[in-house]
Image (spheres, grey):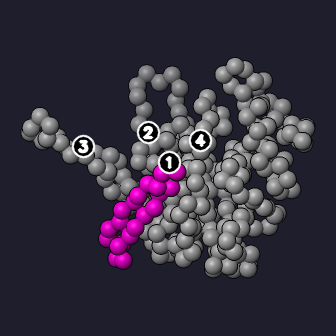
């Protein structure tokens, strides 16, 4: 049963435009839902109306897991998905952070279409929203641990979509690396010679909110976040012209994880593996190509 047949009263589905040669959104959502069908919770339809991007992201996560050869399970209580492999339980909790309340200086401001001048990309606000999503889901996992839904030996993954923040969230270095590894903006230094130059990425270990409070951006460089094994992150948007979910997603391993996610668990998306010094004074991230 496709999603239109299963949820015929959904206003969100009714209002999706008819497929054209360029945009085949209805065909796309039918294919995505085929990976989730049977895993959605009892609140799926009401949440599809209230927060469709979040439900679409759940479909995308289910597709990634099934494309990797896994058979995810789900319940109304606990993380969104669970996968079992080699005697280990892997839990995935999905989140799609929004831009925040309009007018809040810490929120991502809306794009001003038709502006006569170039606008500044709100990098700090984007990273703050992702930092908030990481913290929210970490606390949720801590609650699951306290209630006995998960154990200390389980693998815990946070799956984050930037689709509500796009297209400006598609940064270099990626917004998720700015929130987990304290990365800043790229830079280049020109010397006096014709070819004398150097380049790199600056450090940004915290972002100051409008209240003056500093938000740490080194989520994966802290022992306090060792419960989280990895982050699955995607800049892919359901509503984009080009939809390439696997190419638009990465998995970032937590070098401080209590229970690490084994390398190669995801074989079809890029992996980032980080090696840290014991005192956190230095680290190096390595891309493991699929």
The local crowd at label 3, few if under 14, some if 14 to 19, many if 20 or more residues have their Cα within 10 Å, is few
Residue with the mark numbered 2: 121
**Residue 133 can be seen, yes or no:** no
Residue beneath the point at 58% across and 54% down: 267
Q: Secondary structure at mark 1?
A: helix
Q: Which residues are magenta?
A: 271-290
> Alpha carbon of mark 2 to alpha carbon of mark 3: how far?
19 Å
Q: Secondary structure at mark 2?
A: loop
Query: Are discs 2 and 4 less than 8 Å apart at CB?
Result: no
Quarter of the N terminus within the rendering: top right
Q: Secondary structure at mark 3?
A: strand
Residue with the mark numbered 1: 126
Q: Is residue 173 left or right of residue 73?
A: left
Q: Is residue 210 left or right of residue 190?
A: right
Residue with the mark numbered 3: 188
- Depth-wise, is mark 2 or mark 3 nearer the camera? 3
Q: Position of residue 256 (x, y in %)?
A: 47, 73
> Alpha carbon of mark 1 to alpha carbon of mark 4: how far?
16 Å
Q: Is residue 128 magenta?
A: no
User: Which secondary structure is most common in the magenta stretch?
Assistant: strand
Q: Quadrant of residue 133?
A: bottom right
Q: Nearer the viewer, residue 103 or 30?
A: 30
Looking at the image, residue 176 lies above or below residue 137: above
The local crowd at label 4, few if under 14, some if 14 to 19, many if 20 or more residues have their Cα within 10 Å, is many
Q: Is residue 283 magenta?
A: yes
Residue with the mark numbered 4: 236
Instruction: Mark 1 or mark 4: name the one nearer the start of the chain.
Output: 1
Instruction: Mark 3 or mark 4: name the one nearer the start of the chain.
Output: 3
- Depth-wise, is mark 1 or mark 3 nearer the camera? 3
> Alpha carbon of mark 1 to alpha carbon of mark 2: how far?
9 Å
């Amino acid at each position: 049963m496709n999603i239109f047949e299963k949820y015929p009263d959904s206003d969100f589905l009714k209002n999706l435009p008819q497929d054209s040669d360029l945009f085949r959104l209805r065909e796309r959502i039918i294919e995505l839902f085929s990976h989730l069908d049977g895993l959605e919770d009892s609140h799926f339809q009401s949440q599809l109306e209230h927060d469709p991007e979040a439900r679409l992201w759940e479909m995308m996560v289910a597709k990634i897991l099934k494309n990797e050869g896994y058979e995810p399970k789900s319940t109304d209580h606990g993380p969104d998905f669970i996968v079992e492999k080699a005697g280990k339980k892997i839990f995935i909790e999905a989140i799609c952070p929004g831009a925040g309340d309009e007018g809040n200086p810490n929120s991502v401001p809306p794009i001003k279409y038709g502006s006569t001048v170039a606008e500044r990309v709100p990098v700090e606000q984007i990273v703050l929203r992702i930092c908030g999503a990481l913290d929210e889901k970490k606390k949720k996992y801590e609650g699951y641990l306290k209630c006995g839904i998960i154990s200390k030996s389980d693998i815990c993954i946070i799956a984050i979509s930037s689709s509500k923040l796009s297209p400006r969230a598609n940064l270099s270095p990626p917004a998720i690396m700015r929130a987990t590894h304290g990365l800043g903006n790229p830079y280049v230094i020109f010397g006096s010679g014709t070819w004398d130059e150097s380049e790199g990425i600056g450090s940004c270990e915290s972002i100051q909110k409008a209240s003056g409070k500093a938000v740490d951006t080194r989520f994966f460089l802290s022992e306090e976040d060792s419960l989280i094994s990895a982050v699955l992150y995607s800049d892919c948007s359901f509503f984009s012209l080009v939809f390439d979910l696997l190419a638009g997603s990465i998995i970032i391993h937590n070098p401080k994880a209590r229970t690490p996610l084994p390398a190669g668990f995801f074989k079809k998306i890029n992996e980032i593996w980080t090696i840290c010094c014991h005192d956190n004074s230095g680290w190096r991230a390595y891309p493991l190509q699929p």
